[in-house]
Image: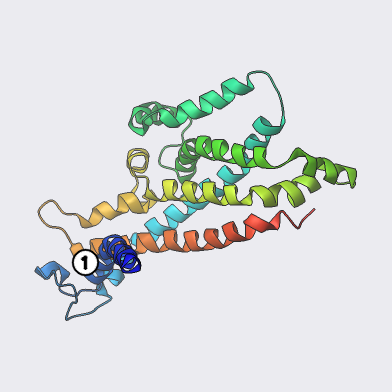
């Protein structure tokens, strides 16, 4: 009875979690989505909604913009956060505690409170309506979490491992690459997933900073299919499905790297 109850609970959670995804995909493939059809198994299956979204809807451009911004945020954030985490974990310098506290405080500031100051600063630097400017903004928001998280991973690595590498004749770069990096790889993957999701799903800054629709990201581009008096539900769900796929692919790839990183550092030196 207890096992049956567990399975029923798991089934209920899966149903609750996956049903919205199923409904999204089914509606995107439903040729009668805009004719008032809300069936769970459409009688007319079509890819017309996807063709319209990518072609006439211009959503392919928005996907490319979001990929550039998200991957730029992930790569730059991972490099900067790891170096900063090593600095605050391994080196003792003045105001070290103050730096850590300020990093934590930044996470507590509401995003809405920073829209106007960052807009003025981006305008002064002539970074409005550019993918580079949007990437810098997302990088600023993802770095505090990444630094704070990676600091714990770096601090958990015994200093004796680094000292043993130095005794074997390894330089700091070799030690960093062969000893420290594999051991903190799980934390690096976790923070990269966070940075990717932040950059991929963010809406407020993308809407505020971008005026040219050619530079819109997927979060802003999705608005095109919501009309004032009617909504193209087939296109909305098709675009939502396309938005979901890159996140799932990135998470699957990152999960594999996360599993590999858990044991990689134990056999490298």
Q: In which quadrant of the rendered view does residue 85 lie?
A: top right
Camera-side residue of 35 and 265: 265
The answer to whether residue 229 is seen in the rendering is yes
**Residue sitting at 44 percent across and 43 percent down?**
130
Mark 1 surroundings: few (<14), some (14-19) or many (≥20) residues within 10 A: many
Quarter of the picture holding the N terminus: bottom left
Farthest residue, direction front: 1
**53 relative position to 255: left or right:** left
Tell me what residue is drawn at x 44 percent, y 27 percent.
Answer: 121
Q: Position of residue 252 (x, y in %)?
A: 49, 63
In this rendering, would 120 be left or right of 18?
right
Q: Vertically, is 188 above or below 56?
A: above
Residue 260, image x and y in percent? 63, 60
Q: Position of residue 238 (x, y in %)?
A: 28, 66
Q: How many numbered circles does the render carry?
A: 1
Position of residue 212 measured from the top left corner of the image (x, y, whole percent): 35, 46
Residue at point 63%, 23% (across, down): 96
- Residue that numbered label 1 is attached to: 234
Q: Is residue 114 above or below residue 229?
A: above
Element at label 1: helix
- Let me know if residue 55 appears in the view: no
Nearer to us in this view, 50 or 157? 157
Is 106 on the left or on the right of 240, as rendered?
right
Residue placed furthest toward the top: 94
Residue at image x 47%, y 47%? 194
* Quadrant in which residue 211 is drawn: top left
Colouring of the image:
rainbow
């Amino acid at each position: 009875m207890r096992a049956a109850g567990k399975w029923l609970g798991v089934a209920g959670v899966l149903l609750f979690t996956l049903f919205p995804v199923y409904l999204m995909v089914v509606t995107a493939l439903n040729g009668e989505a805009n004719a008032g059809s809300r069936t769970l198994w459409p009688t007319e299956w079509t890819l017309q909604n996807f063709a319209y979204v990518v072609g006439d809807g211009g959503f392919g451009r928005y996907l490319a913009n979001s990929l550039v911004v998200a991957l730029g945020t992930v790569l730059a954030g991972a490099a900067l956060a790891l170096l900063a985490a090593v600095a605050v974990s391994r080196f003792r310098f003045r105001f070290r505690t103050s730096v850590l506290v300020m990093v934590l405080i930044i996470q507590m500031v509401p995003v809405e409170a920073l829209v106007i100051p960052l807009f003025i600063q981006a305008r002064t630097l002539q970074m409005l309506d550019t993918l580079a400017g949007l990437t810098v903004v997302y990088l600023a928001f993802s770095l505090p979490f990444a630094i704070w998280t990676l600091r714990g991973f770096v601090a958990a690595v015994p200093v004796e491992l680094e000292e043993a590498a130095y005794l074997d004749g390894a330089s700091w770069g070799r030690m960093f690459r062969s000893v420290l990096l594999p051991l903190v790889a799980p934390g690096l993957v976790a923070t990269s997933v966070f940075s990717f999701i932040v950059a991929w799903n963010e809406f407020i800054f993308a809407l505020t900073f971008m005026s040219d629709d050619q530079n819109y990201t997927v979060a802003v581009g999705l608005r095109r299919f919501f009309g004032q008096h009617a909504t193209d539900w087939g296109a909305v769900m098709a675009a939502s499905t396309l938005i979901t796929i890159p996140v799932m692919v990135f998470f699957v790839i990152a999960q594999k790297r996360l599993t590999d990183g858990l044991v990689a550092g134990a056999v490298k030196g």
